Image (cartoon, rainbow, N blue to C red):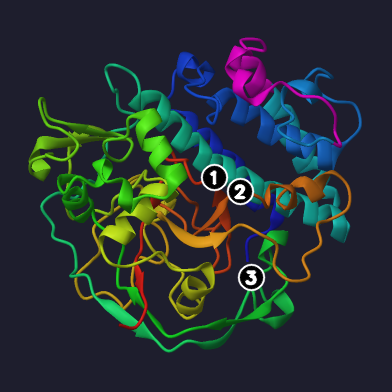
Amino acid sequence: MEGLATRYARVRRQTETLVEPLSAEDCQVQSMPDASPAKWHLAHTSWFFETFVLGGQPFDPSFRFLYNSYYEAIGERQPRAARGLLSRPSLDEVRRYRRSVDDRMLERLGAGLDASTEALVVLGLAHEEQHQELILTDIKHLLGTHPLRPLYRRDEHAESGRGAAPLTFVPQPGGIVTIGHPGPERGGQPFAFDNESPRHQVLLQPHALASRLVTAGEYLAFVRDGGYRRPELWLSDGWGHVRAEGWRGPLYWQFGEGEGAGDAGDAAAVSIYTLGGERPLDPAEPVVHVSYYEADAYSRWAGARLPSEAEWEAVAASAPLSGNLLGSGALHPRAAPLGGPAVGQLFGDAWEWTSSAYSPYPGFRPAAGALGEYNGKFMCNQYVLRGGSCATSRTHIRRTYRNFFQPEKRWQFTGIRLARDPQ
């Protein structure tokens, strides 16, 4: 079993590895308010350990302000939308900060920890794994909106020309199911975020769940059918975003010259930006970078709906915890394999929008103090996503993991799984 010091070193090294392909200029720029510069991620993840685990004399007292994210109990902070203005300290200074924190943390780990401090370290590592995914999605937005659309890293795992498995709907019986993290005492993984608990019962009606994620080719048919010009398919707020932001398709899709939103031509006429650069759309791969509003509109167009998070977890509870995650090296969704499980692609490839509002489970209580702000205060105006993506660490995902975003967000690797009710 991996020791905590070994795990600490591995996770911290992985963050540095993800930043290696970037220039100092890449690490400085902030492409939109939702994204943060890679340099800020490097510093903030170190700030977390220094603030919550190490204490004592800080590396630089100003970092308490510069690299706090949203912890009101800690104090004031640089506004999120203005993180790209922090040209000082330099990237080299931030890296010295990381080394200082690592040296102090490894010394602390070597001396032995009490149970509460060990729990803080484990939380900090999970927090850093979240920021690893954000580094990839944030840099993808930065490079994908660059006029030259440069690549982050050459894609050595691209799969073109492979067809996707047929889409079927697998009946689910419904009934009372138990969801939520069971805790290690009941055989669950040793760590979970507080929003995954308490474990509780939910009544499900009979339904059917799609065997795989919606593909880019299937979504292209929605675009061709005028999906972005038909208000009857959209929630009111979603239609407002379509009109205000000029959405014609998923983020990073580029249509050929003269092609309108309702006349997109074939897949070969559509290019997409990936972390491996720009290339033609592969109709067999899962569609990604769609908002909740787009997922909902597509579902309505397809005569289906989005599953609830309880419906998703009831199936995922007995599925292998494996898939196209960060460890695969693909950094992009892959087509569902032929001959896979009845309900496949539950983990990896794309975060799956659910119809469930992000709200507390029955009996949820946030932790006291600053760490109680980690999840609980965001339980409003957001929707739950499940399953992880091609940018999610294999050691980070769980069957009970609840991700959450506002319904208009598209820069994460977010995709679609359909559900249907009995006819």
The answer to which quarter of the image holds residue 422 is bottom left
Name the residue carrying label 2. 381
Dots 3, 2 in contact, CB < 8 A: no
Q: Is residue 126 left or right of residue 55?
A: left
Instruction: Determine which quarter of the picture holds residue 78.
Output: top right
- Look at label 3 and name its amino acid: Gln
Is residue 268 visible to the viewer in this orientation of the structure?
Answer: yes
Dot 1 or dot 3, earlier in sequence:
3
Where residue 363 appears, as percent x and y from the top left, is 78, 70
Which residue is at 74% across, 53% downward? Answer: 376
Give the magenta part as a residue range: 73-96
User: To which residue does mark 3 refer?
Assistant: 189
259 or 152, which is in the foreground? 259
- Helix, strand or loop status at disc 2: loop
- Is 21 drawn above or below residue 215 in the view shown? above
Residue 7 position (above or below residue 136): below
* Furthest residue toward right: 56
The residue to which callout 1 is attached is: 406
| Residue at (55% x, 65% y) in the render | 398
Looking at the rendered image, the quarter that the C terminus falls into is bottom left
Q: Measure how far apart labels 2 and 1 are at the Cα level.
A: 6 Å
